[in-house]
Image: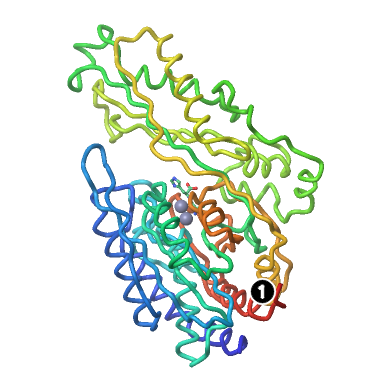
Amino acid sequence: MVDQFLEYVEKHQNDFIERLRKAVAIPSVSSDPNRRQDVFRMSEFLIDELKALDAINVETRDPGQQDFHGTPLPLPPIVLATVGNDPAKKTILVYGHYDVQPALMEDGWDTDPFTLVEDEQHRLLGRGSSDDKGPVLGWINVVEAHKSLGLEMPVNLKFCLEGMEESGSEGLEPIIHEEADKYFKDVDSVCISDNYWLGTTKPCLTYGLRGVSYFHLTVQGPARDLHSGVFGGTVHEPMTDLFALMSKLVTPDGKILVPGIYDQVRPLTDTEEKTYDNLAFEMHELHDAVGSAINIHDSVRHVLQHRWRHPSLSLHGVEGAFYNPGDKTVVPARVVGKFSIRTVPDMELDKVTELVTKYVNDEFKKLNSKNTMKIVCSHAGNHWLASPEHWSYVAAAKAVERVYKVKPDLTREGGSIPITLTFQDALKRNVLLLPMGRGDDGAHSINEKLDRSNYVEGTKLLGTYLYEIAAAKPE
Ligand SMILES: C[C@H](N)C(=O)N[C@@H](Cc1c[nH]cn1)C(=O)O
Ligand SMILES: [Zn+2]
Ligand SMILES: [Zn+2]
């Protein structure tokens, strides 16, 4: 049966790409309130796709409203769908997200980010192609293949798709707790395809994620923007204060300057050190993915340790700053600096917020500025580690060998999927991360892509994984 499935995927790849084209065309940017309708539209697209495939019980849950700077904004629905409910079969919960990061032509895209383009190297370019519309549609392609072939699914599948992952998964956590004994009751294991291979050639299974704590640092001064010729040198400028503070957060070689931030980081043991031996990753792959040889660390081992098991602090942007072309001589009245800290075992989110808040307040006092400053943590999600010995990982490794003819690497991931730990804790089930895309896909960046082969072979992998689960001996 698996052969019939694999053949179907191979034959129908162009139809699957059309499905991805329709999804990418919906600019479901969760962080932009002007795009919220599009995030809703994306949920409707998925609901229609699932209903068309006879997914029984396509349902939604309403996560309520978001407080967007004092304005209530409806949160997009959690889409739940069940395919099969045979008590003799295992039930796998599939989580994914249908929102995307922002994307504008002026960021430097070579093509319109919301028009899927296949280039000469068979790369499918478009926002969300890899993160995470391609993988979500991969699961739907698996269901379509079975329906069209008249094949029974090897396992029961449950979907949980959200539209706020890129903005901290707001509203999802309470729903998972509420539904733990209802919708999620029969789930045996959870699978998430929302990260990337380490490099460009070898698939991997992922058992760890860093957490993320995101901060907004606001400095407010004059009542309105000012002429820098008239007022420059006579008033405390918000942007000057902000840059002074932002420059005290992290050194150019990546050391976080917030006192105490490293205190909770779990020490590296010899056993853990060995997990960095023989991984399929070379320095040139970092250079290729980044597009430049700007590595801080000289060995691959240290690159990966700093991606997976050490915290990092990144500066993201400044809201309210002048950023257009030209030479406007303005003093912005209010600026908001955005930065985040990727957190690792055993850092605690509350402790991180406490340390950052205290440090930024102390540093602001030292500026002797008459402006006002406020620091808030806008969203935070925990780090996660799983047991890669679980039967779900064993099945996934067999599926990789079958589809790709290689043994997968076991990796951790530097990015964050805030809800992963909630699934593990609330459902008390193992979670597997089974990535579809490559390390150079450019998720969150310009020219995001998913290679055609990753989409097609990745769809085969997801389906084969379900067959390997069904074939596994009962525990
Ligand atoms: C790894 C996943 N595909 C991803 O991109 N996650 C985001 C989650 C996030 C949290 N705040 C904003 N986005 C990430 O790691 O940045
Ligand atoms: Zn993302
Ligand atoms: Zn994602």
What color scheme is it? rainbow
Give the image quarter of residue 323: top left
User: Is residue 445 or residue 262 the one in the foreground?
Assistant: 262
User: How many numbered marks are there?
Assistant: 1
Q: Is residue 178 above or below residue 3?
A: above
Residue on which the image places disc 1: 399
User: x%, y% of residue 31?
Assistant: 33, 47
User: Is residue 34 or residue 200 the one in the foreground?
Assistant: 34
Q: Is residue 4 above or below residue 415?
A: below
Q: Is residue 2 above or below residue 44?
A: below
Quarter holding the C terminus is bottom right
Outermost bottom residue: 150
Q: Residue at x 45, y 75 (%)?
A: 140
Crowding at label 1, few (<14), some or many (≥20) Cα neighbours within 10 Å? many
> In this image, 327 relative to 254: left or right?
left
Q: Is residue 372 above or below residue 402?
A: above
Q: Residue at x 34, y 59 (%)?
A: 112
Mark 1 beta carbon near ligand 1 (under 8 Å): no
Q: Residue at x 58, y 69 (%)?
A: 188
User: Is residue 279 or residue 417 the one in the foreground?
Assistant: 417
> In this image, 224 relative to 170: left or right?
left
Q: Residue at x 50, y 41 (%)?
A: 212
User: x%, y% of residue 290?
Assistant: 56, 46
User: x%, y% of residue 94?
Assistant: 50, 67
**Tag 1 secondary structure:** helix
Outermost front residue: 181
User: x%, y% of residue 439?
Assistant: 58, 55
Quarter holding the N terminus is bottom right
User: Is residue 208 or residue 157 the one in the foreground?
Assistant: 157
> In this image, 129 relative to 191: left or right?
left
Q: Amino acid at mark 1?
A: Ala
